[in-house]
Image: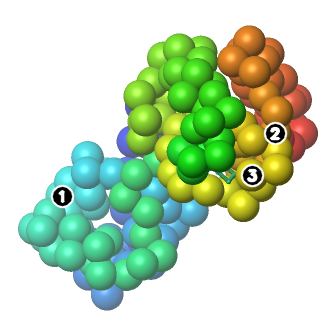
Amino acid sequence: MADQFETVRGIIARFHQDRNHLIQAMYEIQDSLGYISDPIMAMVAEGFGIAKSEVAGVATFYPHFQLKAKARFVIRCCSGVVCEICGNADLREAVRKALRIKDGEMTRDGMFLLKVGGCLGACDKAPAMMINETLYGGLRPEDIPDLLQRVARRELAGGKA
Ligand code: FES
């Protein structure tokens, strides 16, 4: 996080408190960090000599700005009827346990976000779940730790899910 703060300070400093460049600075910060969090908004406000509410107003007005970090991988566990019959509750529990997160939460390293929702349109592969755009069907709870490790390892090696 210290590096992130240095990056933000560097970007802000280039604009010499010129409010006409507030949005440009925020775009550059987001390009560097991927999002503009609450503490970063406070830094921007201080750097430009304006109220934090003004920065927050810009950040929430423009849909381009992300206010939270995005996970590298979004896991979508199906909670549709067919998958429920085929044991998706156990799969979801296996994911929660393997990643030590609850539904809707992201792992601390930003690697995985767990979402639970309706039918994925792959009922013939129930129980089904997706990791980003990749569909996985017929999974068993005991498959989950290895699957998540393979996905994370590929990501760290520069591959895809
Ligand atoms: S109910 Fe799970 S994919 Fe349709």
Judging by the rendered image, the residue that carries numbered circle 3 is 123
User: Looking at the rendering, which quadrant does residue 136 occupy?
Assistant: top right
Residue 30's place in the image compared with 88, above or below, is: below
* 45 to the left or right of 59: left
Say whether mark 3 is within 8 Å of ligand 1.
Answer: yes
What amino acid type is highlighted by mark number 1?
A: Glu
**Residue 152 can be seen, yes or no:** yes
Judging by the rendered image, the residue that carries numbered circle 2 is 137
Residue 47's place in the image compared with 105, above or below, is: below
Say whether mark 2 is within 8 Å of ligand 1.
Answer: no
Mark 3 closeness class: few <14, some 14–19, many ≥20 residues within 10 Å? some
Mark 1 closeness class: few <14, some 14–19, many ≥20 residues within 10 Å? some
* CA–CA distance in space, label 1 to label 2: 50 Å
Image location of residue 146, percent across then percent down: 79, 16
* CA–CA distance in space, label 2 to label 3: 9 Å
Tag on residue 46?
1
